[in-house]
Amino acid sequence: MKMLDLYPAGTRLELGSVTFTAEDIIRFAEKFDPQPFHVDAEAAKAYVFGALCASGWHTCANWMKSFIGFIGREMKRLNAEGIAPPMIGPSPGFAELQWLKPVYVGDTVTYFMTPLESRTVQGRNRYILNSALSEGVNQHGETVLRFKSNLIEFFPDEEQAQ
């Protein structure tokens, strides 16, 4: 079954939620984005955010973790219902990445994906490119992360991709 058949365009899918702790923020930032406002709570007070906050890349990584968890749960559900799940991945990229608000210690971000469109990739009838709006929303209902994502869907039977 195709992704867009399962999740029609405009359907907002809730992928999962993550609560950001100081330990997680610092651990991620020390490895991947060691700026003072991500690794030192005291130093962060002097920066524009005013407090320790998560790296934008950390918020993106948690979107991906939530997406993978969602897809895993959906594959199990579909298999249990006797429905062949879509074969997805990899992504050819994303666009328009926006970090709209800082994510602070204690914030819980709920991640979403809203399918937008699906098209057959020219010259490769066995592949479909799915586009979606991807978001993270904090516990106050504020969007903290937004980007347009793309995902390739593979069909072992060329006829299915038509």
Image (cartoon, helix red, strand yellow):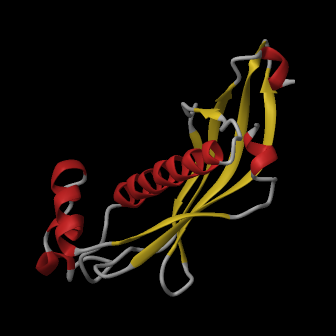
- Residue occupying the point 71% across, 43% down: 131
Residue 34, placed above or below residue 36: above
Quadrant location, the N terminus: top right
Residue situated furthest right in the rendering: 162
In the image, is 94 to the left or to the right of 20? right
**Spot occupied by residue 124 in the image (x, y as percentages of width and height):** 75, 14
Quadrant in the rendering for residue 152: top right
Residue 119 image offset from top left, x and y in percent: 81, 33
9 with respect to 145 (left or right): right
- Residue at 15%, 55% (x, y): give it: 30
Residue 5 horizontal/vertical position (percent) = 81, 45
| Along the viewing direction, whichever of 51 and 108 lies nearer the viewer | 108
The vertical placement of 104 against 6, above or below, is below
Q: Nearer the viewer, residue 122 or 85?
A: 85
In terms of depth relative to the viewer, which is nearer, 156 or 150?
156
Q: Is residue 153 above or below residue 13?
A: above
- Residue appearing at x 22%, y 58% in the figure: 29
Q: Residue drawn 12% across and 80% down?
A: 42
Q: Quadrant of residue 107?
A: bottom left
Quarter of the image containing the C terminus? top right
Q: Is residue 70 left or right of residue 119?
A: left
Q: Is residue 123 left or right of residue 52?
A: right
